[in-house]
Amino acid sequence: MKILFIWPNYDCPIGMSIGVAYLSSVLQQEGFETKILHINEELGYPYDKDTIVKDIEEINPDIVCISTGENHYSDMYDLSKKIKEKLETKIIIGGIHATLNAEDVLTLDSPYDYLIRGEGEWAIKELMIGLRDKKDISNVQNVWIKKDGIILKNKMRRFVDNFSLPFMDLDNWNFEKITKLRRGWVNISMNRGCPYRCTFCHNLAEVKILKEDFNCATTSNKELGYLRLRNIDNMINELKYIKNKYDFVTAFSFIDDTFTYDKEYMKKFFVRYKNEVGLPFVCLTTVNDVDDELLELMKDANCDLVRFGVESTTDRICKNIIKRKFSEEKLRNVFKKCKEIGLRTFSYNIVAHPSETKEEIINTMLLNSEIQPSGIRISLGYPYKGTEYYEIAKKMGQLDETTEYHNYSTGTKFKFTLEEKLWIDKFKSFFWWWLNVNQNELLYSLYNPLILELESIGINEWYNNKESILDYYIELDRKISEQLQEKNIPHYNAPYGDRPDIALYQNNRVLKKELIDEH
């Protein structure tokens, strides 16, 4: 059997889906032929339904598998309908949007034949083997099946502790080009699950599904078995394989939600990584999940950058909307320790939450200005359907269901006034100016006039001439930054034209473009 995976990755930063890469390798291990269509304009393969359907006809797969989130779901739905018009192939839909909204996605009149909820490696293997060998597939866990005018809704399967995986399928991607466009960084995953329950994240929504399917009393990680670590031997062997096979790989980016949640386990891993892999790496964690000893071990293992989720520092937003709050004292201490040992830091922030005010957004910038991360990223709050964040916004009457974006840094789906949306648009375009005004008097004198000037631009002028206005201020900002760098005056600027959501602290330990995983 020939299985074709389709992964939409357009109008957003280029990358490779490690989820699809593992699904493909699991099937290859069972003797299936697999192929991947990676839809991305930087690869010369933009989203064009007619071209994609024509290519699918030439490939002539037995099964088409589509993995997508909400941002690209409507396009993938249209594509699936067109595939059904041209071919008789079965279509499987998977991904986090399908997992959280299975009832809406797999309907009797939808173009999909199967839906996979949650992690798909074991489910897709069992489903494909059943289809190939003409066995009964009606009870495959994690899989919903359209059959004889009804939908069979199988429950989720229990998780495997300390799991192992076959190495990612990298040959079905334009791996070299993707990696070089990312300056040599390769995404990889060490663990699964998350200890936290932030409303904006899929983890909270997913554990609620698991609680029901597992018939558990709570959504605790212990009861659900949701937190799992990959077998260290398996992980190290895959890292070594990638490093040794591809000489254009310069570093690894661990995309785990909370990389260091099991400190003792990670201490063992860092020793192995240092001795057997050694390439620079970047990871994502929280200030609650590191201590001085662990940070020093990470640095010693060649960690180049730690990404921390700061998200928001406003009590009202943290308590009532995102339901996540870390101690500001802990934030300060962790960032201070990282500076002391020369470990670069990255601060992730979400702004424009439903009902969030200008003052609350600026409040988050104040703390970032104080802790001085090496880099900072700003995202706009995005209410993914199926999350508690979506339900909170809906109850507040803050949802704007008329807009849709392929990238959650593009625009807001919340009901702000026109004036508020205007300010948010300006802020996200030059947010680092608000960081600079709180650094010292010199930077205040340079950047506060720019903020006032920016804020004075009227709504018609901004939206009618946005491109030229942005070009003017970006060039002005570049010149000011160059002058400051000549004088060795630390400050923030956004050096990547293709990533205006990322600003870097320009000092003697600046994150160079070739050394940072900005995705």
Image (tube, helix red, strand yellow):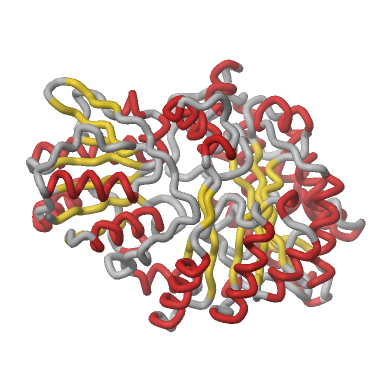
Closest to the observer: 380 or 481? 380
- Name above or below for residue 406 compared with residue 146: below
Q: Is residue 367 left or right of residue 218?
A: right
x, y percent for residue 343: 74, 69
Q: Is residue 326 left or right of residue 497?
A: right
x, y percent for residue 364: 76, 42
Residue for point 87% across, 55% down:
445
Q: Quadrant of the N terminus?
A: bottom left
Residue for point 62% across, 65% down:
495
The reply to whether residue 75 is visible in this rendering is no
x, y percent for residue 309: 67, 48
- The total of numbered circles placed on residues is 0
Q: Residue at the right extreme? A: 441
The reply to whether residue 81 is visible in this rendering is yes
- Name above or below for residue 163 compared with residue 180: above
- Name above or below for residue 89 compared with residue 343: above
Closest to the observer: 294 or 84? 294
Residue for point 24% across, 49% down:
48
Residue for point 10% across, 37% down:
85
- Name above or below for residue 267 compared with residue 287: below
x, y percent for residue 170: 33, 68
Residue 108: name its quadrant.
top left
Q: Is residue 368 left or right of residue 375?
A: right
Q: Is residue 456 left or right of residue 145?
A: right
Closest to the observer: 14 or 250? 250
